Image (cartoon, helix red, strand yellow):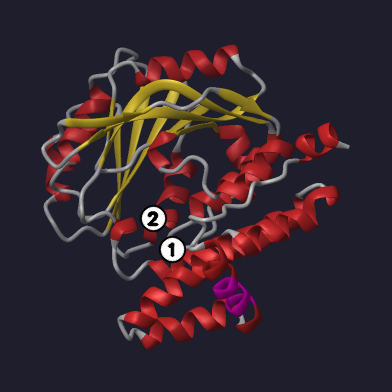
Amino acid sequence: MAPQISVILPIYNGERWLEQCIRSVFNQTLTDFELLVGDDASTDRSRGILADLKYDSRLHVFEFDQNVGLFGNLNRLLEKSNAPIVRFLCQDDMLEPNCLAQEVAYFESHPEVVMSICSYHFMNDESHVIAEHKNIPYIVDPERCLQMLFYHGCIAGNLSTVSARRPSLEQAGRFDERFRLAGDYEMWVRLCQFGNVAERCDRLIRLRQHPRQLSKSKDVGVQFIYECRRIRAQILPLLPKSIRLRALKYTAWRQDALDAHYFVRCLVVADFDKCLRLIRIMGVRDLVMGLVHWLLTLNNHLYRPKPIFVRDLKATE
């Protein structure tokens, strides 16, 4: 018999906080779960830590001899999962004790929801809570969610905030392994087209903030810009025709200005390799106009464009 929920945990060299992360799953009030861990050819003590924790039959470890990347790891774990609900978890983070019970209850009471985004606490290197974030709760349909993903980027923010229905994930298809950083963002674009998406005020996880996070690496900026521009281009034809031109205008004044700001930062420190890569990614026209909008808006501090949603447009017509 399948468990009620599958916890998907991709890891790579996660020895520092791995045991703490896994024990937060073992200590759940809901006990009918499976924990699937994919070790992506770690070179630290991660495999030894996992071996010591195998006394719990709910833990299933899959070891890869070659590095397949985060999204390749997620795909392999999803293929092995059995529960109707999937909860994602990153190796630095922790679940609150009631997390899985609340996830299962929420999906049971909201059959129209295919993806849930929870609120969270922030913790530091020493696992002390240092701040908290509480979402404004809402449930949006696919049309509205696509607009939010276009204007605001990856609305989930962090992989660990997300739970989803496994049948809907299967309908959406695999994570695109060509992405290095924003493969989750691209997946949510596809997933949201199969049902409603909810943001919840329940703080069900603890997200760890530390300087070694991939998102804080000095080398990811250009790649992140490239991947996000690619995803917005994917979303644009899915938006209602009535707002596409306005969406493009928003992108020019907001996103292109922010990307141009990164170009200026690279130029100031004489990182000409990144500058050339950004020119190739944005194109000369978008970069020049981005610089103009960056100057006129003082990097969106003097003026910040307001996204136009189709329902807002109908209300003013």
Q: Magenta-highlighted stretch: main secondary structure? A: helix
User: Which residue corresponds to mark 2?
Assistant: 70
Q: Residue 172 location in percent, x, y?
A: 64, 45
Which quadrant is the C terminus positioned in? top right
Magenta highlight on residue 98: no
Label 1 CA crowd tier, 10 Å (few <14, some 14–19, many 20+): some
Q: Judge whether 10 appears above or below 317 on screen.
A: below
Q: Which residue is drawn at 43% across and 70% down?
A: 262
Instruction: Give SS at disc 2.
Output: helix
- Lateral position of residue 193 relative to residue 29, left or right: right
Compare marks 2 and 1 and give the one earlier in the sequence: 2
Span shown in magenta: 286-292
Q: Nearer the viewer, mark 2 or mark 1?
A: 1
Q: Residue 240 location in percent, x, y?
A: 81, 47
Inspect the image, locate mark 1, and give the three-letter code of the amino acid beneath it.
Arg
- In the picture, residue 94 is in which quadrant? top left
- In the picture, residue 96 is in which quadrant? top left
Q: Which mark is residue 256?
A: none
- Lateral position of residue 181 relative to residue 302, left or right: left
Instruction: Give SS at disc 1.
Output: loop
User: Which residue corresponds to mark 1?
Assistant: 180
